[in-house]
Amino acid sequence: MGTSQRSGCPINLTLELLGDQWSLIVIRDIMFGRRRHFRELITKSEEGIASNVLADRLRRLVENGLLSKRDDPAHKQKAIYSLTEASIELVPLLVQVGAWGRRHTPADPVLAKRAKQLEEGGPKKWKALMAHLRASHIGPPSA
């Protein structure tokens, strides 16, 4: 993250890394929307992220270890973005943000239903989701 940190407070450091308008949205779309390519992230963005902003957030998330990037073997000019362990560990935080938003904002009923299911499923459901994400983004554990 560099030397431009305002303080060493863990909450501050987390917000400096994730607190802009787009970083968690990009992680959300990869995590819950199963979007792994730039084109999917840009064309299926409900929030209408600009391509230059998306490119910047993807670069920053990769640099900070929240996403990994590899070439797509099916298409040489495409990259596949994957969650890392650090971003998978955001599941409980995102569940709580979604639960708060469901209760305190005019959330879309369909999307609020998913947030409610995750909230009510509790840590057991979150751990299962995290295991699934690890399998599909990181791969099987090393022996």
Image (tube, rainbow, N blue to C red):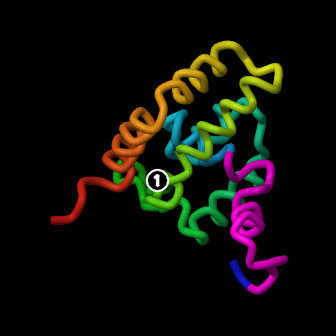
Give the number of callouts. Answer: 1
State the residue in front, 135 or 14. 14
Instruction: Give how far across and how far down residue 42 sits, in percent.
Output: 67, 40
Residue that label 1 marks: 82
State the residue in front, 77 or 28. 28
Q: In this view, does 143 lie to the left or right of 121?
A: left
- Farthest residue toward the top? 109
Q: Is residue 10 left or right of residue 33?
A: right
Disc 1 marks a residue whose amino acid type is Ser
Magenta segment: 3-24
Residue 69 appearing in the image: yes
State the residue in front, 63 or 44. 63
Instruction: Give how far across and how far down residue 142 sits, in percent.
Output: 21, 64
**Which quadrant is home to the C terminus?**
bottom left
Helix, strand or loop at mark 1? strand
- 130 is higher (above) or lower (below) than 52: above
> For residue 11: magenta?
yes
> For residue 8: magenta?
yes
**Which quadrant is home to the N terminus?**
bottom right
Instruction: Give how far across and how far down residue 141 sits, in percent.
Output: 24, 59
Picture residue at 74% right of the left edge, 78% below the top: 8
Picture residue at 50% right of the left edge, 61% below the top: 86
Instruction: Give how far across and how far down residue 55 sits, in percent.
Output: 69, 57
Picture residue at 45% right of the left edge, 38% below the top: 123
Q: In this view, does 25 lie to the left or right of 79?
A: right
Residue 136 occupies which quadrant of the picture? top left
Residue 81 appearing in the image: no
- Farthest residue toward the left? 143
